[in-house]
Amino acid sequence: MSFTTPIQTTFQGSSPAFGFWLTLPSAGVAKTILHGSSGSSTRFTWVLVDAEHGLISDHHYYELNNSIGSENASPIIRVPNAEEWMIKRALDAGAHGIMTPMCHSEVDAANVVKWTKYPPHGSRGYGPMFAPHSFPNVDPGAQYDEGAQKGITVAVQIESKSGLENVEKIAAVPGIDVLFIGPFDLALQTGVKRGGEEHEASIQRIKAAAHASGKKAAIFCTDGNDAQKRAQQGFDMISVTTDVGVFRNAMLGELKTANGETVQGGSRDGY
């Protein structure tokens, strides 16, 4: 059996890779969302395990990776910062990919690639005793070791002024698979209105840079309508929503219904 992951398999098709943000350290939440028929002609093929802003720490990684991997989806861990030891911990716990926040330059991107690969392609320390467990049908040893060199998805977030200015150089770095847009920070860090013309122009520049270098363009969305728009624009990897956003909206919506109030829709203004 070859080394494959659900997200990489989806990348080979014509449809976007839809995923969601997991901010709560709960395997039960992840499996509740992923398990069984989706009721749609598509399904979630990746989950962003948010250890940057979520309530998730590295001691949660192993259980979360295994619960997500067992449901034919790829756990992608967003580490708190682009540091070698943080990336190593995520990968050794079985992540199918890593995402690093605030990639400012091609040097930053090259370091992320280096820390993700074993020698001679990088400097990742060797010790994947538990890493293969979240990869169904991948054996420990050579199959994981060799497969991980190319099969681990490497994503960097473009969400700062310097990252935007250097995006074409970042996209050209060998070993980077995905440029992921963080729209909230992109607006804040560049001093523009989120959703305005300047913000949208920056988003489209990042997408174009990714595609020009043969990389995947990805973006965080607040809901299904936002995600549908980005899919129509040609984004390859799209976060549809977040666990906490859906929980809050659904629970408060049911409370309003119970109280005889009208439940109004609309996009969320945050996570």
Image (tube, grey):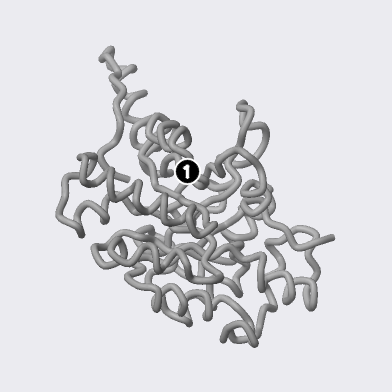
Nearer to me, 226 or 132: 226
**Does residue 28 appear anywhere in the picture?**
yes
In this rendering, position of residue 218 left or right of residue 69: left
Q: Position of residue 49 (x, y in %)?
A: 48, 57
Q: Split into 4 quadrants, where in the image is the C terminus? A: top left
Q: Residue at x 36, y 39 (%)?
A: 222
Q: Which residue is mark 1?
A: 235
Nearer to me, 49 or 117: 117
SS label for mark 1: loop
Q: Decide: few, some or many residues near mark 1? Use Cα within 10 Å; few <14, some 14-19, many ≥20.
A: many
Q: Position of residue 28 (x, y in %)?
A: 56, 48
Q: Residue at x 48, y 71 (%)?
A: 173
Q: Position of residue 73 (x, y in %)?
A: 63, 49
Image height of 220 relative to 50, above or below: above
Q: Residue at x 78, y 78 (%)?
A: 141
Q: Split into 4 quadrants, where in the image is the N terminus? A: bottom right
The image quarter containing residue 3 is bottom right
Q: Which amino acid is tagged 1?
A: Phe
Q: Residue at x 62, y 66 (%)?
A: 152
Q: Position of residue 228 (x, y in %)?
A: 44, 31
Image height of 41 relative to 203, above or below: above
